[in-house]
Amino acid sequence: MSKSKSITDLVNELQQENESLKRLERLANQYTKMEFQCTVKELHDKLYKLEMYDRKAREREAARQGQQDGTMRSE
């Protein structure tokens, strides 16, 4: 039979895990700043903007292809 943990023990475990995750987050930010000269949030924002730019470029190209196909059919 498993031993039940007290609420205090569970809270302590969660606090330790939270501190560990905060350390990992700081390390990830330090690495990102060294490697990419920006924070993780800034990198995410840049990647999102790039994704949106690429999507719009593909949509514009698809629209051009559709217009070209339409003009070729009418000729």
Image: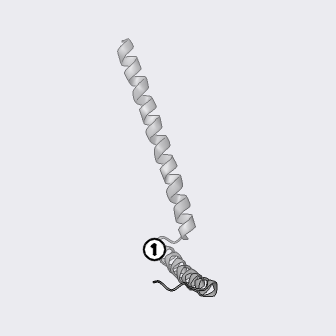
Q: Is residue 38 above or below residue 2?
A: above
Relative horizontal placement of residue 56, taking residue 66 as reference (left or right): right
Element class at badge 1: helix
Q: Is residue 74 above or below residue 51?
A: above
Corner quadrant of residue 12: bottom right
Relative horizontal placement of residue 66, taking residue 4 as reference (left or right): left
Q: Is residue 36 above or below residue 12?
A: above
Corner quadrant of residue 10: bottom right
Judging by the rendered image, the residue that carries numbered circle 1 is 35
Q: Residue at x 46, y 46 (%)?
A: 54
Please state, as top left, top right, bottom left or bottom right, where the N terminus lies in the image: bottom left
Q: Is residue 21 above or below residue 45?
A: below
Q: Nearer the viewer, residue 38 or 48?
A: 48
Please state, as top left, top right, bottom left or bottom right, where the C terminus lies in the image: top left
Point out residue 68 in the picture as x, y percentages from the top left corner.
39, 24
Q: Nearer the viewer, residue 74 or 20?
A: 20
Mark 1: amino acid:
Glu
Mark 1 neighbour class, 10 Å CA radius: few under 14, some 14 to 19, many 20 or more: few
Going by the picture, which residue comes out furthest to the top?
Answer: 75
Point out residue 59 in the picture as x, y percentages from the top left corner.
46, 37
Point out residue 49 in the picture as x, y percentages from the top left corner.
53, 53
Point out residue 57 in the picture as x, y percentages from the top left corner.
46, 41
Q: Residue at x 53, y 79 (%)?
A: 21
